[in-house]
Image (tube, grey):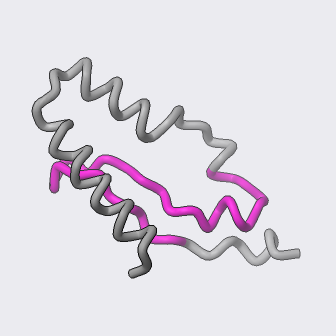
Amino acid sequence: MDRKERALKRILQKLGAVRQVLSKEERVWLDRLVLGPEVEGHLLSTNPKQSLRPRIHWDAKSATYVIAEKTEPDQKNRD
């Protein structure tokens, strides 16, 4: 795990701890701030660099923000 990934994990742990003490409205605001607006077009990106970025989402089961696994871009995007 490189330095950036460790720093990101620390930040996500701290955000998760802050999220637990917020009201419902404040949690919604924080989620929008951290996760950004959900736009389907970003998921269909043809830019390989963009599609390799880690995705972050809130996991209610573990009550933390989670970094999704990096996925390889589609073969058609490499052309």
User: What span is in magenta?
Assistant: 43-70
Q: Is residue 53 left or right of residue 48?
A: left
Q: Quadrant of residue 30?
A: top left
Q: Is residue 10 left or right of residue 52?
A: left
Residue at 50% x, 62% y is 54
The location of residue 59, given as percent across then percent down, is 26, 51
Residue at 16% x, 53% y is 61
Q: Is residue 32 left or right of residue 48?
A: left
Q: Decide: is 4 above or below 66.
A: below
Q: Quadrant of residue 40?
A: top right
The residue lying furthest to the top in this view is: 25
Residue at 56% x, 72% y is 71
Q: Is residue 53 magenta?
A: yes
Q: Is residue 65 magenta?
A: yes
Q: Which is more toward the observer, 74 or 49?
A: 49
Q: Which is more toward the observer, 25 or 13?
A: 13
Total marks shown come to: 0
The residue lying furthest to the right in this view is: 79
Q: Quadrant of residue 69?
A: bottom left
Residue at 88% x, 75% y is 79
The location of residue 29, given as percent across then percent down, is 35, 24
Q: Decide: is 72 above or below 7.
A: below
